[in-house]
Image (tube, rainbow, N blue to C red):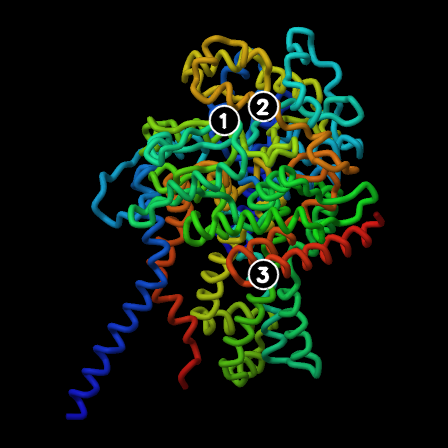
């Protein structure tokens, strides 16, 4: 009896989970479907769900109008390198906070997080002026630095949380065996925290990929990523929803595929240490 | 490869690829920031022709209107020099021209024929008599209506209707059972959305934003009359949720045959008469925006224009492009390839003298609408500002965005018209005092 109740509950949970999942995914699904409609069908009332004449015309128009590969390449570089550099800085920072905490460690962590509470537009002009002075406007290098810095608090926080789950005694043992600080972090700590580091990498890659304030305001042509690509198809005067949907689908496709293939790693990392 | 080597390689890749892109951007490449609309996208398609003629390559940065506005404003106020040409409107041009942020367009070639630019456009894009931006296309607003529904209602639309007639006609055309709303108008918050419409409408009711001493005027009877008339008519004959409808939402409704009448930008005429997009393409008529017998109509005046920021190093190349893109030759190029209905309208007098263009159904009404709006004399009572649906002062955009939010909240029934006007008065007074007026 108890087993059948459990099975029934499981079924209910599964249905509810699928329902919530579909609800969350629906806007993306709708965007993908709209990208295959004509502009007239895209605005039809009542909306047409599946039964319409599917067309690839919007993708052809977008491909013709924009250099998609240049935007994509910029997105990959900006998201990838900003995340990578962020991890390189955050691992030692998180190590010191997790294993050699001081009286101020908690304050420092909270202070770091508080920088995320400042609306980005509040520092747009100072950052813009600094970029002009340094010749970094519309450069990938400049944007990599900015994206790394804005995501650094999250990276440090995540790694700090993962590192706290690792027993300090293991690191002590390594030290007693003569490991240097560098060796301790690279050869002992990092391998044990791989799931956590991997999920941090993935999550911050996604955050950097989707970042749309700085990537729109600090770029023009050379460093513009996919967020600028999407913005070029949004129009308040003219019905271009189908083309906008095609551009959006092309922009989110790489990150959707990456998320799909790495979902196990992501879930494992996010739940790392959740149950002891 | 060690981790360190891989890191170095990745960094070099990022930096050198940036350098390579920069190397491509040789001295004969100009960067243009522009807005995403049909005419601008069409122009991008002909860029290769310009490059072939002049040897000047063009890089486009196309953005949504509000993003573009923020982007180019940041760049020009900091002298960032990211763009050689900026697409700006009638609101920005006189302000930026006065600040010395734009290169004067006072030395364009004789063949370009500056005198051919419609006087209303040239006036709105000048400061102190100097042209600072060349109009790519211009627009006003006008009445677009369903001729079949009007006929069924037993009414005939005059060329120059009054608001009283409009209210009567839309009430007669409204058929809720058939899902037909008598009228669709912008109620969406935003100074360029519902804010633009209600300001232009208020001109015909005798209202104004400021008196001669820059005092806010929302506590006047004229503003109350404007908003009450708008809300009463829309509640009775407008679509559900009109408080959140802007240009695109109304275009969608009209094209699906769900609006008897729509008063909006003249550029919409080419959309609603295009059989590929509109279900009612063959039954659309046009008329001037309504008035109230006070001598001012409720139409606005706007132009998307090309300007050269003072920070650019390529003034000559930028002006060459502007001359090409806003010339009569460009209009003829588009007409030859895509038909006269698709040429950028509202910028040049000669276009409206062209018999080919006169055959386009909405051409004459577009011109009449543009000619009936005067940015220097847009209100019944005198004002200290220039502009029809805006006041060309830097503070206006911020104030009008807040005020239009209050108005939209009133349309949605979240507050009364009186409350919205009281808040508008308080917001405007406070902001103007803070700005030192």
Residue indicated by mark 1:
B39
Residue B188 rendering spot, x and y as whole percentages = 53, 49
**Left or right: where does residue A4 sit relative to residue A229?**
left
- In what element is the residue under mark 2? strand
Residue indicated by mark 3:
B416
The label nearer to you, 1 versus 3, is 3
Residue indicated by mark 2:
B136
Going 53% across and 51% down the picture, which residue do you hit?
B231
* Image marks 2 and 1: residues in contact by CB distance under 8 Å: yes
Residue A8 rendering spot, x and y as whole percentages = 19, 82
Q: Which mark is residue B377?
A: none
Classed neighbour count for the residue bearing mark 1: other residues with Cα under 10 Å, few (<14), some (14–19), many (≥20): some
Chain letter, disc 2 residue? B
Q: Are marks 1 and 3 on the same chain?
A: yes
Outermost residue to the front? B154
Chain letter, disc 3 residue? B
Q: Is residue A228 above or below residue B86?
A: below
Classed neighbour count for the residue bearing mark 2: other residues with Cα under 10 Å, few (<14), some (14–19), many (≥20): many
Going 58% across and 61% down the picture, which residue do you hit?
B416
Going 34% across and 59% down the picture, which residue do you hit?
A25
> B311 or B295: which is nearer to us?
B295
Residue B247 rendering spot, x and y as whole percentages = 48, 41
| Mark found first going from the N terminus, 3 or 2 | 2
Going 49% across and 48% down the picture, which residue do you hit?
B233
């Amino acid at each position: 009896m108890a087993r059948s109740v459990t099975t029934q509950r499981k079924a209910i949970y599964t249905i509810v989970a699928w329902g919530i999942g579909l609800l969350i995914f629906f806007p993306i699904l709708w965007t993908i479907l709209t990208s295959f409609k004509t502009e007239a069908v895209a605005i039809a009332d009542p909306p047409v769900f599946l039964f319409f004449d599917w067309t690839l015309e919007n993708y052809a128009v977008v491909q013709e109008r924009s250099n998609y590969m240049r935007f994509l390449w910029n997105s990959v570089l900006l998201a990838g390198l900003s995340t990578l550099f962020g991890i390189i800085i955050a691992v030692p920072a998180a190590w010191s906070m997790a294993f050699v905490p001081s009286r101020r460690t908690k304050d420092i962590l909270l202070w770091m997080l508080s920088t995320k509470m400042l609306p980005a537009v509040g520092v747009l002009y100072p950052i813009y002026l600094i970029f002009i002075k340094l010749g970094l406007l519309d450069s990938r290098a400049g944007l990599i630095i900015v994206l790394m810095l804005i995501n650094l608090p999250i990276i440090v926080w995540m790694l700090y949380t993962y590192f706290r789950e690792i027993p300090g005694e293991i690191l002590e043992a390594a030290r007693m065996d003569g490991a240097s600080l560098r060796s301790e972090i690279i050869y002992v700590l990092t391998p044990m925290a791989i799931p956590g580091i991997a999920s941090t990498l993935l999550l911050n890659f996604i955050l950097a990929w989707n970042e749309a304030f700085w990537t729109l305001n600090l770029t023009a042509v050379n460093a513009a990523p996919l967020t600028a690509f999407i913005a070029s198809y949004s129009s308040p005067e003219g019905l271009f929803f189908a083309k906008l949907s095609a551009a959006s689908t092309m922009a989110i496709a790489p990150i959707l595929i990456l998320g799909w293939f790495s979902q196990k790693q992501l879930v494992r990392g996010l739940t790392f240490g959740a149950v002891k | 490869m060690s981790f360190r080597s891989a890191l170095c390689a990745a960094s070099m890749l990022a930096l050198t690829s940036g350098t390579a892109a920069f190397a491509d951007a040789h001295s004969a490449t100009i960067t243009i920031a522009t807005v995403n609309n049909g005419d601008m996208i069409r122009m991008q398609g002909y860029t290769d022709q310009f490059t072939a003629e002049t040897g000047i390559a063009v890089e486009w940065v196309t953005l949504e209107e509000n993003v573009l506005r923020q982007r180019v404003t940041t760049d020009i106020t900091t002298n960032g020099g990211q763009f050689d040409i900026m697409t700006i409107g009638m609101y920005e041009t006189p302000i930026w021209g006065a600040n010395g942020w734009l290169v004067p367009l006072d030395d364009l070639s004789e063949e370009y024929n500056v005198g051919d630019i419609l006087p209303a456009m040239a006036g709105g894009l000048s400061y102190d008599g100097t042209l600072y931006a060349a109009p790519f296309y211009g627009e006003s607003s006008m009445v677009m209506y369903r001729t079949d529904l009007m006929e069924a209602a037993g009414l005939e639309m005059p060329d120059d209707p009054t608001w009283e007639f409009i209210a009567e006609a839309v009430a007669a055309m409204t058929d809720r059972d058939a899902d037909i709303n008598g009228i669709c108008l912008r109620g969406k918050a935003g100074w360029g959305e519902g804010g633009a419409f209600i300001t232009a409408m208020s001109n015909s009711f005798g209202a104004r934003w400021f008196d001669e001493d820059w005092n806010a005027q929302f506590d006047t009877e004229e503003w109350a009359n404007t908003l009450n008339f708008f809300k009463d008519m829309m509640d009775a004959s407008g679509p559900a949720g009109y408080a959140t409808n802007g240009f695109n939402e109304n275009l969608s409704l009209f094209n699906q045959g769900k609006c008897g009448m729509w008063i909006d930008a003249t550029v919409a005429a080419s959309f609603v008469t295009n059989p590929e997009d509109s279900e009612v393409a063959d039954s659309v008529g046009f008329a001037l925006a309504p008035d109230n017998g006070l001598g001012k109509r409720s139409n606005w005046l706007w132009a998307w224009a090309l300007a050269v920021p003072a920070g650019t190093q390529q003034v000559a190349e930028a002006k060459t492009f502007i001359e090409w893109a806003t010339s009569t030759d460009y209009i003829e190029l588009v007409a030859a390839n895509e038909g006269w209905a698709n040429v950028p309208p509202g910028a040049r007098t000669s276009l409206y003298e062209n018999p080919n263009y006169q055959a386009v159904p909405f051409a004459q009404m577009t011109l009449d609408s543009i000619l009936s709006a005067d940015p220097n004399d847009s209100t019944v009572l005198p004002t200290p500002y220039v502009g029809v649906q805006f006041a060309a002062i830097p503070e206006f955009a911020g104030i009008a965005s807040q005020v239009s939010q209050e108005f939209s909240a009133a349309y949605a029934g979240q507050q009364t018209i009186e409350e919205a006007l009281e808040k508008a008065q308080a917001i405007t007074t406070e902001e103007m005092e803070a700005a030192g007026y």
